[in-house]
Amino acid sequence: MANTDDMVPRVEHERVVSELRRANHRLSGTINIVLATLDSEDVGTLFTRVLEEITDTIEATGTLVYLAEPDGYHLRGASKGVGGLRVPRFIPFDRAIDSVTTQARGAVRLRVQTPDREQLRQGRLSEREVLDEGSQLSQRIPVDLLPPFASFYAVPVWFGSQVVALIEVGWTRQHPLAQDDADLLDSVAHYLSVQLVGAFSAFRTQREGRLREASSQIREELLAHDELAEGDVQLAFAHAATMVSAVAVPLHENAYQRIMMADLPNSGSQVVPLDLSGLAPNGGEAEGVGIAPITDGSSLHEWLHGLGEPCIGAVVDAGKVAGARRACMFLRAADDEPFDDLDLAFLQGVAHDLVVAAAGEEARSHDRRISQALQTGMKNQLQRVDGITSEGLYSSATAAATVGGDFYDLIRLPGRRACVIMGDVSGKGVEAASVSAAVRTALGAYSWEGLRPAHMVRLLNDFLLGFSRLETFATLFVGMIDLDKASLTYCSAGHPPALLLRAAEAELVPLDVQSGVVGAFPEMRYRDGHTTLTNGDVLLLYTDGTTEARATDGRFFGEDGLRDAVMRHASDGVPGICQALLGELDAFTDRTLEDDVALVALRFDEVG
């Protein structure tokens, strides 16, 4: 049997060794915390590595860090040990533990008291008693503002006279809280103060950069649409909500009853007690964008909270967009952090981009109406000419395409003569349509004067240089047909070479006398080409949208593809060949033409 006197020194020895080990662990842990911050280059490294080191040093369940912002403390880091536990993401000023630490000027040791029977009979507790082991004073703190710990240290991080952060280190079960550990955490907090201030600045910079990038992406997506639809607006709202960790709840205005409706995440369709008239300037018209935070205690917050809905966030009103009032609530859970100035500025920017995109769409719509009016007065047409069978076809790249610059015409002239014209004016919309109209009118007048094609094009070049306010140019094919003389005199000004299908030889001959484009340079020289015609010959004119059509794998249809297609469909005759060629293009591109296509085919039936 061991001597009792011998056991006492042994127990004391083990206690001293344990204390030395504990002190050594605390010391090495503190050194590791310092080393972890010396080479940290980003916020993520600082928060993850340092919080794990603190947790390991104190041998705690986990560590949380909150950074002070203008409206309260925002959760900015958590160690792995608290994964899966409910953690408050936001702590308002002077509502909970921060007031205790501020008064103490240092780390405090806090223990959440076990509720008594009376409190347990009340069901779910909204508040808990928290004891300060140093002062032996207790206070009631809302449950949703408490960390997931039964015992914990709350450590203020001071920078000068301001608390810039709050660190909470604790255990999920009751655990003894030593004053020397509180002193150690105070020392760590003092060392970390400068790093945390820098981390906060870096965190804001990084988040501001992410929001700016997302804003640019949303803006590009909106401006990519020729016409904004409701779905485009909702996608923009949803994308924005993802960036601010919220759910987007679009608001729909019932103009007759003057009420706002919304489909809430949990309770479905509801009349929202909200008046947007004071939110956006100009009563919510397109010129103004309104935004207002939904904060704890506001009437909208209380209404949403009463329905069990997310109730922290902001209301954004973009005014009238895509034919209707566009407003949206961006909501977070009740215990989540409120939107800060970066969140609000980002959401306001998205709403502004909606307004800009809608204004641009309205301008484009206005341009389309003008362009369509111009085209109504200058429809592509082929006049009936005795001795010539003709077919013309124009296909827009998309069903909603604006009127572009492709055009053609066949003008009947005295003495069994005719003038055939095909042109492609650069650009789209009003400018291209108006230039096309002017070019066709001028060429029509020149043709009646009996001018040679090169002369007509040279006069047109001078005309265009003084006509367009923009840098607009055109490619043209102008051909003067004389059936009695069986001749075609032409000027091809930057235009794809016309093809002449010889009936007798069954071969394609390109009309390859080429000149420069029209309307680009004042001293451009133009020349005529000449060819003879025989009965049955077919002249094919086309714009570059034909040869530059792309397959889904990126291949071009090209001039070879066009020639092969013409020879395959030569027996289709005129009319018929243009429609057959368009069918080939549709099959080649899988019906995804990227540019407008114009085709004209003339068969010479009575030559000589």
Image (cartoon, helix red, strand yellow):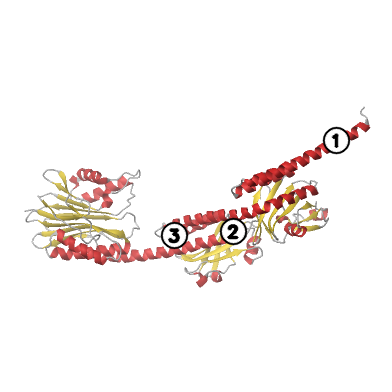
Residue that carries the numbered disc 3 in the rendered image = 229
Q: Report crowding for label 1: few under 14, some 14 to 19, many 20 or more residues within 10 A (C-alpha).
A: few
Q: Earlier in the sequence, mark 3 or mark 1?
A: 1
Task: Point out residue 74 in the picture as x, y percentages from the top left corner.
Answer: 65, 56
Q: Nearer the viewer, mark 2 or mark 1?
A: 1
Q: Report crowding for label 2: few under 14, some 14 to 19, many 20 or more residues within 10 A (C-alpha).
A: many
Which label is found at residue 504?
A: none
Tell me the quadrant of the picture where the N terminus can be found: top right
Q: Earlier in the sequence, mark 3 or mark 2?
A: 3
Q: Nearer the viewer, residue 277 or 346?
A: 346
Rounded to the nearest whole Å, what is the CA distance between mark 3 and mark 2? 24 Å
Q: Nearer the viewer, mark 3 or mark 1?
A: 1
Residue that carries the numbered disc 1 in the rendered image = 13
Task: Point out residue 170 in the picture as x, y percentages from the top left corner.
Answer: 74, 48
38 shown above or below 437: above
Q: Nearer the viewer, residue 351 or 202?
A: 202
> In the image, 482: left or right of 127?
left
Which amino acid is tagged 2? Leu
